[in-house]
Amino acid sequence: MGIRDTDRTLPSNRMVFELRRDPEAYDLFRRDLEASMARFKLSDEEKQAWREVDLATLARLGLHPYFLPQVSRLFKGGGYNHNDSEAARLYAEKMKIASGAAAR
């Protein structure tokens, strides 16, 4: 999936964008994923992908490629952002990237 596969109307794209910019929206996301997904009117398929942190499905649905690693940061935090961070490991696991490849 590439940038040309992005669905600009996909509610998950707006959700990631807003969660990264709005501390109150992010706080709601951290406290109540279901309420956050309802606020952005995600489809049932999107909701299930978020619950499972299913990045491949989010990509297939049209999530912007830049936002894919951002999803793992939303769940695991972006502090101390490096190749072996919890967020990077989650991204590699969900995208089926070998651990050696993720460190490059």
Image: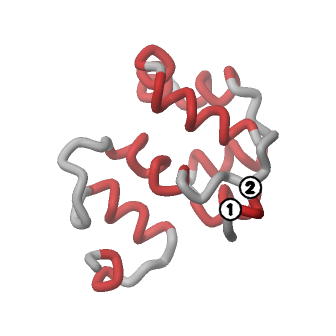
- Secondary structure under the numbered disc 2 in the rendered image: loop
- Residue 27 coordinates in the image, percent (x, y): 42, 20
What residue do we see at 33% from left, 54% from top? 87
Which residue is under mark 1? 3
Q: Secondary structure at mark 1?
A: helix
| Quadrant (top left, top right, bottom left, bottom right) of the N terminus | bottom right
Specify few, some or many for label 1: CA neighbours under 10 Å numbering under 14, 14-19, or 20 or more: few
Could you say which is closer to the camera, residue 16 or residue 32?
A: 16
Residue at 59 percent across and 25 percent down: it is 36
Residue farthest left in this picture: 80
Res. 31 image quadrant: top left
Q: Which residue is mark 2?
A: 6
Residue at position x 28%, y 79% from top? Answer: 104
In-image side of 40 versus 55 (left or right): right
Q: Is residue 25 left or right of residue 13?
A: left
Horizontal relation, residue 66 to residue 30: left or right: right
